[in-house]
Amino acid sequence: MRPDELREMYLKFFEGKGHSTISGSSLIPENDPTVLFTTAGMHPLVPYLLGEPHPSGTRLCNVQKCIRTGDIESVGDSSHLTFFEMLGNWSLGDYFKEEAITWSFEFLTSSEYLGFNPDQLHVSVFAGNETVPVDDESIRIWEKLGIPRERIFELPMEDNWWGPAGKTGPCGPDTEMFIDTGKAECGSKCRPGCSCGKYFEIWNDVFMQYRKTDSGSFEPLSQRNVDTGMGVERTVAMLQGKASVFETELFTPIIEAISEGSGRDMQADADTGQAFRVISDHLRSAVFILGDERGVVPGNLGQGYVLRRLIRRSVRFARNIGMQEGFSGPIAERIIENYKHAYPELETQRERVLSELMTEEARFEKTLNRGTVELSKVLEQMKVHNQSVVSGRVAFRLFDTYGFPLEFTEEICSEQGLSVDRKGFEKAFKKHREVSKQGAESFKGGLGDHSEATTRLHSATHLLHRSLQLVLGDHVQQRGSNITPKRLRFDFSHPAKMTDEEKQKVQDMVNEVIQKDLSVAMEVMTLGEARESGATALFSGKYGEQVKVYTMGDFSKEVCGGPHVERTGELGHFRIKKEGSSSAGVRRIRAVLE
Ligand code: SER
């Protein structure tokens, strides 16, 4: 089965069970300062898991692109990826364990669908702890479906509990599905969840019935939800009987491009294999981040830093297999080719993706040369003095002065049996940030944050957006938004720095609308209808998809998930604190309500 067929079959299957297919979201979360990237399909749906009605109903399914860079150092083995596609079906206070598990089983094993042999299927369930009991209900359902008790594993919270991407939010026990690859057990403790590769996890059904609070306790949610996630890459590998995701057509054309560029064979030896996997994974992620509708560019903070790290790490491995500057272009072209039918945004952003990659590569070549020389000097000195730990201060100087990433210093050091004082580095980094006033903000808030302060800033963002269009012109388009309970941050397209007069005009306009105390109304309609009615619609979904449209008097009309205040008068006084450049052609405003 090809990846396209899998995506289509999955959505059809769940549509047949009463689900509406919704569009996947951007990789760059909107209005969520708690995470840098969309890490799972459930992430953009957090408000709905917490009780906000979804315009498409209570049963949803989709394909979501995800980035997880938590274990970037593990990439290079046979299964770790930083970018992956997740198929998901959701119940928002609708069905629960019985239906979710039964449908997962049907989709996995029925010959009409994936047709896995039920004997290959192993599952895990939550073992329970002091506060939440063992998930007996899931055990009973799996048994009823014919999975023998010895293939149902009870695992602790680290394995079978899905927590929120941010620190607080919806969570609950889960049941995970594994395919036994037939490999020998790695030892007597080998079981689903073991990393040896015998059991390949392909699907996870999460039963979200709790909300993790700021204090770390679990409160029952007002509605019980289901959040499932099936990994496309992993499932395709298992369906095709491949030992690794890199052997599927999601990767083979990319691997070929690396082979052509380096003149090497991936199978040559272990290091070459690792380099091929790192390069293909990291560049695939970089292409998807750069090609996202809300594309970010390489930088030294936040998403930009993760992107920079992915590109730079791929450069380093590319060098190891003899690839020269400019290597990333042809590989990126192949990635776009391989994915553009499913993700047309990559084709639209092709030029941008390629030029940003090239620029970052060239920038890094320079850095790398200077940094490597500098680091070798440090290492020589250390050998002379018989030292084995690079101080945080030195690692930070390499980072700050030479742009040499900490991870590289660590990797190079560990190759020579040395280590780096990471804590010391972080200390130095923090000090630097305070000094340079880049602002260490407390990242409270998130999509689950419906606090009054956040809601008011969210509504103020709509007023700001419209005022910018009226003052600067219709070319102004939202390019990003990020809200904490303390401030809003709004990125928009505009070619020049705003003048003081323009800023004042915008601020006055927002305050005037606030004073008019306009009523805020919400209507549900299709995206097509919303666009036709003149609503600002940022997201690129299907014409017929149901969306919410928020109108503020006759001033602003936007497609948005909400929530919002009821009247603009609730907002108080709006003040622009800062206007500056975010990236080429994009300006950034920080503002507060007082
Ligand atoms: N949120 C769960 C996961 O990412 C299920 O979708 O595994």
Image (cartoon, rainbow, N blue to C red):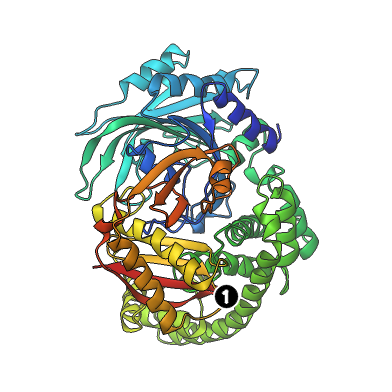
Which residue occupies the foreground of this view, 305 or 500? 500
Residue 194 in the image: x percent, y percent?
Answer: 46, 38
Residue 149 visible somewhere in the drawing? no
Q: Secondary structure at mark 1?
A: loop
Where is residue 237, by image quadrant? top right
Residue 591 in the image: x percent, y percent?
Answer: 34, 70
Which residue occupies the foreground of this view, 65 or 81? 65
Where is residue 575, by image quadrant? bottom left
Quarter of the N terminus within the rendering: top right
Residue 242 in the image: x percent, y percent?
Answer: 67, 37
Q: Image check: 34 left or right of 237?
A: left
Q: Residue at x 63, y 22 (%)?
A: 113
Residue type at mark 1: give it. Ala
| Relative height, residue 406 to residue 44 (above, below) | below
Residue 62 in the image: x percent, y percent?
Answer: 54, 37
Q: Dot 1: few (<14), some (14–19), or many (≥20) neighbours within 10 Å? A: few
Q: Image check: 41 left or right of 268?
A: left
Which residue occupies the foreground of this view, 435 or 312? 435
Which residue occupies the foreground of this view, 16 or 214? 16
Residue 449 visible somewhere in the drawing? yes
| Picture mark count | 1
| Relative height, residue 470 to residue 448 (above, below) | below
Quarter for ligand 1? top left
